[in-house]
Image (cartoon, rainbow, N blue to C red):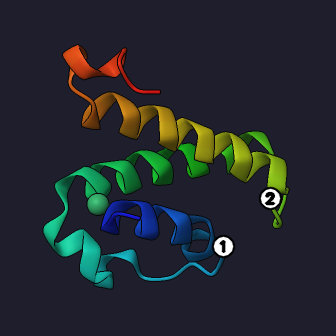
Amino acid sequence: MTDCAVFQDRLPELFETSANLSEEEHLKHCENCTALVRDLEYIAQQAKLLLPIHDPSPTVWENIRSAIKSDVGQNSSSPSSARSAT
Ligand SMILES: [Zn+2]
């Protein structure tokens, strides 16, 4: 697992506990995850507006996670190697 994967695995927990993400070590040196967190904060904000619930269902986080995965996949694979995976 890469640092980014480990960090992103913790993201739902961090969001749920309203952790101070600016104190996350990983974000201090990873622009990719910093941008990702910024996007997620925006998505979470929109989600709260759309769904006034205090306890997001696992489905919500699953959707966000798959959005993360597709986003990271686009950023980390070069166009030439994207098709040769698996
Ligand atoms: Zn990262």
Q: Amino acid at mark 2?
A: Pro
Crowd class of label 1 (few under 14; some 14 to 19; many from 20; radius 10 Å): few
Q: Locate residue 15 relative to residue 31 in the image: left or right.
A: right
Q: Locate residue 28 relative to residue 23 in the image: left or right.
A: left
- The location of residue 13, given as percent across then percent down, is 62, 74
Mark nearer the N terminus (2 vs 1): 1
**Residue at the (70%, 52%) spot, across then down:** 61
Give me the C-alpha separation between circle 2 and circle 1: 8 Å
Q: Can residue 52 be seen here? A: no
Q: Nearer the viewer, residue 56 or 73?
A: 73
Q: Are marks 2 and 1 in contact (CB under 8 Å)?
A: yes
Q: Label for residue 16?
A: 1
Identify the element where label 2 is drawn: loop
Q: Can residue 41 be seen here? A: yes
**Residue at the (20%, 15%) spot, across then down:** 80
- The location of residue 78, given as percent across then percent down, is 20, 25
Q: Locate residue 13 relative to residue 11 in the image: left or right.
A: right
Q: Which residue is mark 2?
A: 56
- The location of residue 47, given as percent across then percent down, is 68, 44
> Where, by quadrant of the figure, is residue 21 drawn?
bottom left
**Residue at the (44%, 69%) spot, across then down:** 6
Q: Amino acid at mark 1?
A: Glu
Q: Quadrant of the N terminus?
A: bottom left
Instruction: Give the number of marks.
Output: 2
Identify the element where label 1 is drawn: helix
Q: Nearer the viewer, residue 62 or 6?
A: 6
